[in-house]
Image (spheres, rainbow, N blue to C red):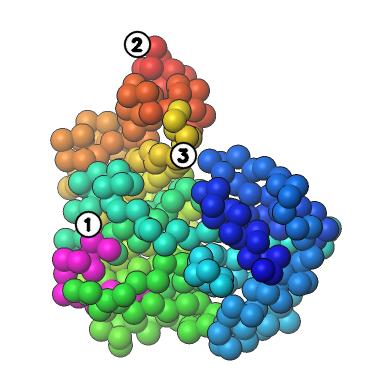
Amino acid sequence: MKDLDTIIETAFRKNASDIHLRDGAKARIRIDNSLAEFPDLPTVNMQSLVDEIFDYLTEDERNAMLALRKAGKDMDCAFSNISGIRLRANIYKTQGGLCAALRIIRPDRLSAGEIGLPFSVTDVCNKKSGLFLITGANGMGKSTTIAALIDIMNSTRQVHILTIENPIEHVFKSRKALITQREVGTHTPDFYSALRSSVRENPDVIIVGELRDLETTRTAIELAETGHLVIASLHTRTAISTIDMLIGQFPSAEQQQIRMMISESLIGVLSQTLLVRKSGGLVAAFEVLIATSAVRNLIREQKIPQIKSLMQTGKNIGMFTLDDSLLGLAESGTVSAEEALSKSQSRDELTARINA
């Protein structure tokens, strides 16, 4: 068995989420958010491992990777190894040489129920148009959540779902829905180009892997306004900071117009993070903002910080803050109080609520 496959198989058996590879060192594997070295694994030879990854790529994917390497850029791809285990890879240069981070994509995708998605989020799958944003730091389960929403629509709606990803992680088979997956760098130059041409591909639902730049964001908002359901991800950590970031990336002369567009097209924002269960494994905590008429008014009137008070009183419609979710996990004994506090944006306030 190739060294790469030995490392991947070991990580998969141990239910790991990520693999870190560095030339001349042992692989490190992330399990339940903790990174550990496994001395029994082969010492990494990065050039050999990169060649092994290339062996698993299609010709188009190899050419895209070679173009990135020639341009001196990090190389991103997704591939399945000899056992069919699918991974997302980022290969990058450092002072110490070539390194790689591999994310394991589990074949048994979690359902919305298994993730614990609230009804206010799964209800997005019934919408015909608008913008829904899924946010969180790297490795906090955004792709898993998006995949769960796609699975719901694939089972319930006769629509065309177009995904734009970098790279393609979860591979879907069309069932009730028609699913078309495009990979940036392989099938399209960038997110903006794919979004701009998407109207000619007649999609009902557009999934955008990441809103990376102003033009991509602008086009996504315009598509949401013109009758498409757009679901996109961002690396922001809270619902309020997400709206601030969306508006703030535009020149000041455009911000009022963008504010109006967002207030009209936004469905809501889901922010999520992962915590370590007391019993082992990971569990998600969420923050949910629903774009009610009151929320839309606050966006238009530049009173975004006041949205938090609406979230705190909107539980009956499935709206709540991250601290509400963390408190529930701590009170139920799912996670320790310290683990919940480590993820809080308002540690003192949450401490008082836990101790009340």
Give x and y (percent) for residue 11. Answer: 59, 53
SS at mark 3?
A: loop
Image quadrant in which you'd find residue 181 = bottom left
Query: Which residue bears the numbered disc 1?
Result: 124
Residue that protrudes farthest toward the top in the picture? 356
Give x and y (percent) for residue 329. Answer: 36, 29
Label 3 vs label 2, nearer the camera:
3
Three-letter code, disc 1 = Val
Q: Is residue 42 magenta?
A: no
Q: Residue at x 41, y 39 (%)?
A: 283
Q: Residue at x 30, y 39 (%)?
A: 307
Give the label on residue 238, or none.
none
Q: Is residue 70 left or right of residue 260?
A: right
Q: Earlier in the sequence, mark 3 or mark 2?
A: 3
Q: Earlier in the sequence, mark 1 or mark 2?
A: 1
Give x and y (percent) for residue 47. Answer: 78, 71
Query: Residues under labels 1 and 3: Cα distance?
Result: 28 Å
Query: Residues under labels 1 and 2: Cα distance?
Result: 35 Å
Three-letter code, disc 2 = Ala
Callouts 1 and 2 close, C-beta under 8 Å: no
SS at mark 1?
A: helix
Give the label on residue 281, or none.
3
SS at mark 2?
A: loop
Magenta extent? 151-163
Quarter of the figure that contains the N terminus: bottom right
Callouts 3 and 2 close, C-beta under 8 Å: no
Q: Categorize mark 2 by other alpha carbons within 10 Å: few (<14), some (14-19), many (20+).
A: few
Query: Which residue bears the numbered disc 2?
Result: 356
Three-letter code, disc 3 = Gly
Q: Residue at x 16, y 61 (%)?
A: 126
Q: Categorize mark 1 by other alpha carbons within 10 Å: few (<14), some (14-19), many (20+).
A: some
